[in-house]
Amino acid sequence: MLRIWRFPSPESQAFLEAIEQRQVSLPAELTEQVAQILDDVRREGDAAVLRYIREFDGVDLTPEDLRVPPTELQRLADQAPQDVVTALQQAADRIRRFHEGYRLSSWGWDDGRAWVGLQFRPLDVVGVYVPGGRAAYPSTVLMTTLPARVARVPRIVVCTPPRRFFEQPVLAAALRLAGVEEVYLVGGAVAIAAMAYGTATIPRVDKIVGPGNVYVAIAKRLVYGQVAIDAIAGPTELLVLCDETAQPAWVAADLLSQAEHDEHACVLCFTTSMNHAEAIAAEVVRQVEFLATRTTIEAALARGGIVVFDDRDAMVEWANRIAPEHVQVMTDGAEEAARRIRNAGAVFVGPLSSVVFGDYWAGANHVLPTAGTARFASPLGVYDFGRWYSWIRIHPPGVGAAVGVVERLAEAEGLPAHAAAARIRAKG
């Protein structure tokens, strides 16, 4: 079920290089279809939105039906199982506390000649996409809305497909915990278009965040520049770095936890012993038998594998080259090994630190860079919901100090009007 290679065999290197080169798959044949949807919504507004809802979701709505009334949100939230609501509340408390650690205060320095600094301001309107596929993810609702709340975004707009929303009261419960009341019943690329361009009913937003299917991913890529986006997210990824000190049953359980997300999930294990690798693979076979998500898991496992390294330095080097969404370090001296990981969306240190605790409870954001983008990208956070701008005030002594510098550099660049604008202030 999980293939095993010993590094540096040609087969192992070919496997690792293929993983390193992975990309988010956005089929070209779908791009034209999505582009047409975006153009229709941009030109026709609500009329196109309602037409596509009828076509894709089989639901006839009017413009007045698009927004879920706050009273209906409250009614739905009240139907959520109380034990789930309690768990969501505990998760929300930790997520909020973690994100309140971001420093949002403006700052600068004054040398007597000028005050130069940065000011932080929240975005005016943020759009959050909540998918309506086979599973509801209230935890992702919290992870995408609570940081926006901490950033003091005054208006948060949520779009979600109409057919499933009323069947998933846990989503309404999560929205209530986050204090979000503006929810529109539109999904897929149509929702992305509506939030990017605005309609008579659905407001234009400054940034769109949240996961979705391939149509959502393509739409987000196409509207980028019209609005900001969080990322083009790929399937979930987990790399477990371990040695014989790690219990095979624990490693297997963690691999299965991420494999059940998506048949395209990428689950990998690097270990230092062939016997250990075989024990982990056997545990995977044993544990998967009892899981309702077995079909999805087995499809994902067929894409993954275990690689046995004799050289721990090579193991860490390949972890950094792959730059996974999640790296779990379960070795002797895990803290030291984890500090050598440079490229990852999140690093889980030690055998107790299962990736699932990060999915739901720890508090750090679980919206993370995938497909190798952890080489340059960061987790979703408070700073994603605002922007910084420079704040500059020149004092009288600064004019005399600056004018000579400005004159020389402006003239060197062939910009005489720049030099003149500085000189005119020096003359008073």
Image (spheres, rainbow, N blue to C red):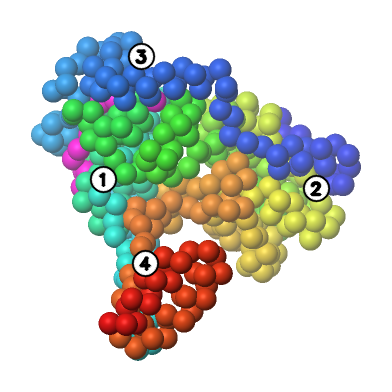
Q: Pointer 1 and pointer 4: residues touching (CB < 8 Å)?
A: no
- Counting residues from the N terminus, which is met first, the one under dot 3 or under dot 2? 3
**Residue ID at (80%, 48%):** 308
Disc 3 or disc 1, which is closer to the eye?
Answer: 1
Residue 185 part of the magenta segment? yes
Residue 390's disc number: 4
Instruction: Look at label 2 and name its amino acid.
Output: Val
Query: On the rendered structure, is 194 left or right of 268?
Result: left
Task: List the residue tagged with mark 3.
Answer: 56
Per the image, label 4 sits on a secondary structure element best described as: strand
Instruction: State the separation of the CA atoms marked 3 and 1.
Output: 27 Å
Task: List the residue tagged with mark 2.
Answer: 308
Q: Position of residue 378 (x, y in %)?
A: 51, 54
Instruction: Look at label 1 and name its amino acid.
Output: Val
- Counting residues from the N terminus, which is met first, the one under dot 4 or under dot 3? 3
Task: List the residue tagged with mark 1.
Answer: 125
Instruction: Choose top left, top right, bottom left or bottom right for residue 173.
Output: top left
- The reply to whether residue 78 is visible in this rendering is no
Instruction: State the separation of the CA atoms marked 2 and 1.
Output: 49 Å
- Counting residues from the N terminus, which is met first, the one under dot 2 or under dot 1? 1
Q: Position of residue 77 (x, y in %)?
A: 20, 36
